[in-house]
Amino acid sequence: MATAKEELYPRKILDYMEGFLVSKTLFAACELGVFEQLHASERPLSAGELAERLRSSEDGTARLLSACVGLELLTAHTNTDGQVVYSNTEMSTVFLTQSSPKSLYHSIQYSSRTIYLCWHYLTDAVREGKNQYEKAFGINSKDLFEALYRSDEEMLKFMQLMNSIWNICGRDVVTTFDLSPFKCIYDLGGCSGALAKQCVSAYPESTVTIFDLPKVVQMSREHFVSTQDTQISFYEGDFFKDALPEADLYILARILHDWTDQRNVELLTKVYQSCRPGGGVLLVESLLHEDHTGPLTAQLYSLNMLVQTEGRERTGSEYTSLLTAAGFTHVQIHRTGKIYDAILACK
Ligand code: SAM
Ligand code: ASE
């Protein structure tokens, strides 16, 4: 029951109604380079000084900085001469500057330039039950990844998005289960290799092969994985069309949520057939509660899968059904409490 107070002042609804103002403030501050400039500067800067360095208007910059203070992304301090100067908070330094190892800069960029545009058509996506690339970007390709990778630039942005989250929650998903018995690991749709790196650092006796589409592998070699990562190699292929190499463990991180149940059973069946006896599969996904009451992040991500892909987020038992339909047994589900959870199944 709502309390009398809530009826008079619908705080939650007002917050939700204007939630996108918060997102856009963060996006603009990142895109303009606010956190970068403050990080590069040895001292706090005034709105005027920042405006000059960012080549932005002084008035607009002052308002943006003030909103960032309200969001606790910046702190403001008044000098003895009465001038207001700004600096990054510790959180902004760690997560919003480009050079930080835990930077979310590229995730924010992809949210701003791609996801935000798709979500403009969320109502249509719900009505039609399909993604909105045609309306948002004028693309009518039947191939999902042709749409997602509509240019090299867009592919790189997507890869950077995929990359950045594993610096924050990658360790958890690869150490949830003891994967040390699995020496030969394939990361199907392994993309930029961020999870592969987490994996080889946790398991120094294992090797990880990143299996992905040829142009993704090429981009990954060029921008993400160094030749000094000797435990990591690449394999170019299409996991729906080509034969899968034999391995002890297949990692499928954020793969099944892109596709329908039918395509997933098709893919998992191929994985099962190539898997060595005693081997297994590790799924990494954002799990919904069994009764779909949460977590909110997974619920919202499921809507994002609707506007951007052919898939959905699922519950642990939904993934179990897909795995058992393909032949896997002993399904173990582990929730990490962070965005991504882990499921291990055996052959
Ligand atoms: N596993 C990575 C992660 O969690 O960061 C990337 C997940 S991303 C959503 C899906 C990945 O699957 C992309 O790297 C994409 O290129 C790859 N992919 C899509 N279709 C594929 C196919 N038919 N064969 C091989 N890889 C594919
Ligand atoms: C995919 C994952 C993502 C396909 C498209 C995607 C993400 C964003 N766009 O497999 C990462 C998760 N974030 C959200 C908002 O869903």
Image (cartoon, grey):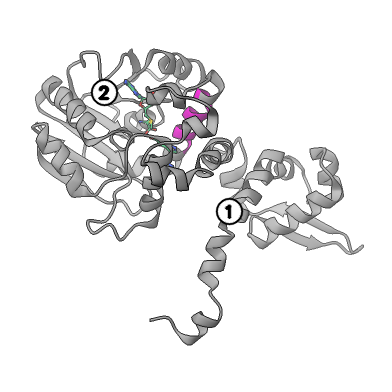
Q: Which quadrant holds residue 250?
A: top left
Q: Quadrant of the C terminus?
A: top left
In this figure, which residue is indicated by the disc labeled 1? 20
Give me the C-alpha separation between circle 2 and circle 1. Answer: 39 Å
Q: Position of residue 81 (x, y in %)?
A: 92, 62
Residue 304 falls inside the magenta stretch: no
In this figure, which residue is indicated by the disc labeled 2? 186
| Residue 129 visible in the shown view | yes
Residue sitting at x 50%, y 81% = 7
Seen from the viewer's position, the closer of residues 319 and 41 is: 319
| Residue 45 visible in the shown view | no
**Quadrant for ligand 1?**
top left
Residue sitting at x 58%, y 53% = 20
Circle 1: element type: helix
Q: In the picture provided, is 106 more to the left or to the right than 263?
A: right
Seen from the viewer's position, the closer of residues 302 and 66 is: 302
Circle 2: element type: strand
Q: Which quadrant holds residue 96?
A: top right
Residue sitting at x 27%, y 20% = 239
Q: In the picture provided, is 5 more to the left or to the right than 216?
A: right
Q: Amino acid at mark 2?
A: Tyr
Is the CB–ligand 2 distance for label 1 below 8 Å? no
Q: What is the count of numbered marks?
A: 2
Residues marked 2 and 1 touching at CB (< 8 Å): no
Lower sequence index among marks 2 and 1: 1
Provide the major secondary structure of the magenta segment.
Answer: helix
Q: Residues within 10 Å of mark 1 (few under 14, many from 20)?
A: few
Residue 163 falls inside the magenta stretch: yes
Q: Position of residue 186 (x, y in %)?
A: 26, 23
